[in-house]
Image (tube, rainbow, N blue to C red):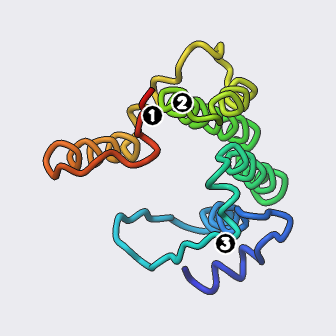
């Protein structure tokens, strides 16, 4: 990131517990192009005392925090965008789409968070709750992760990750 862009974007918003960096990235995108890379750019240490642990264990909290970041962005700098109200609504619907498929994965694997995720999704989507957001399945990132998971299982003989294991009855 360029220092000049960081100075324009301002400081992290402390009221956003977990997603203040995400909201800052949204503000930075107003000043120039944002790139995405699949390269490893750093190492992350994972431990039980880190701030993100409750959000990993309860993904609906994570969805809520990301939604708060979008709201903060559109309440401030993002309000200057030409289609700000439509973009705000699109972000809200997409969070619902993501939560819907997360809920499906929770239901399939018989995990307890399915109900809360379906409720979160239903509150944010325009479509009826029974109708799946099929277009979400065609997103490159989603397809790429499914492909890599399938390749590991078929070619490398690696087991499915814990989030995809179906409990034995």
Q: Residue 78: image x %, image y %?
A: 75, 54
The correct choice, above or below, for 43 with respect to 129 in the image is: below
Mark nearest the camera among 1 and 2 is 1
Q: Quadrant of the N terminus?
A: bottom right
**In the rendering, which numbered label is found on residue 110?**
2
Q: Which residue is mark 1?
A: 167
Circle nearer the N terminus (3, 2): 3
The correct choice, above or below, for 34 with respect to 108 in the image is: below
Mark nearest the camera among 3 and 2 is 2
Taking the image as shown, residue 93 lies to the left or right of residue 36, namely: right
Pointer 1: residues within 10 angstroms few (<14), some, or many (20+)?
few
Pointer 2: residues within 10 angstroms few (<14), some, or many (20+)?
few
Taking the image as shown, residue 151 lies to the left or right of residue 92, namely: left
Mark nearest the camera among 3 and 1 is 1
Q: Residue at x 68, y 64 (%)?
A: 27
Q: Quadrant of the C terminus?
A: top left
Q: Residue 54: image x %, image y %?
A: 70, 58
Q: CA distance from mark 3 to mark 1?
A: 28 Å
Pointer 3: residues within 10 angstroms few (<14), some, or many (20+)?
few
Query: Considering depth in this image, is 130 or 168 the residue closer to the camera?
Result: 168
Q: Secondary structure at mark 2?
A: loop
The correct choice, above or below, for 91 with respect to 75 in the image is: above
Query: CB atoms at circles 3 and 1 under 8 Å apart?
Result: no
Q: Secondary structure at mark 1?
A: loop
Query: CB atoms at circles 1 and 2 under 8 Å apart?
Result: yes
Q: Residue 147: image x %, image y %?
A: 27, 43
Q: Which residue is mark 3?
A: 50
Q: Residue at x 71, y 32 (%)?
A: 116
Q: Quadrant of residue 84?
A: top right
Q: CA distance from mark 3 to mark 2?
A: 27 Å
């Amino acid at each position: 990131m360029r220092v000049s862009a960081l100075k324009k974007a301002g400081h992290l918003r402390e009221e956003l517990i977990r997603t203040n960096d995400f909201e800052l990235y949204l503000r930075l995108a107003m000043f120039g192009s944002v790139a995405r890379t699949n390269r490893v750019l750093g190492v992350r240490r994972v431990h039980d005392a880190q701030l993100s642990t409750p959000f990993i264990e309860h993904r609906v909290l994570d969805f809520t925090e990301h939604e708060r970041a979008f709201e903060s962005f559109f309440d401030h700098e993002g309000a200057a965008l030409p289609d700000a109200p439509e973009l705000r609504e699109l972000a809200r619907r997409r969070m619902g789409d993501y939560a819907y498929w997360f809920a499906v994965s929770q239901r399939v694997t018989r995990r307890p968070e399915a109900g809360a995720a379906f409720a979160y999704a239903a509150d944010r989507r325009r479509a009826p709750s029974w109708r799946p957001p099929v277009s979400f399945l065609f997103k490159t990132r989603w397809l790429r992760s499914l492909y890599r998971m399938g390749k590991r299982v078929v070619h490398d003989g690696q087991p499915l990750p814990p989030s995809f294991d179906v409990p034995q009855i």
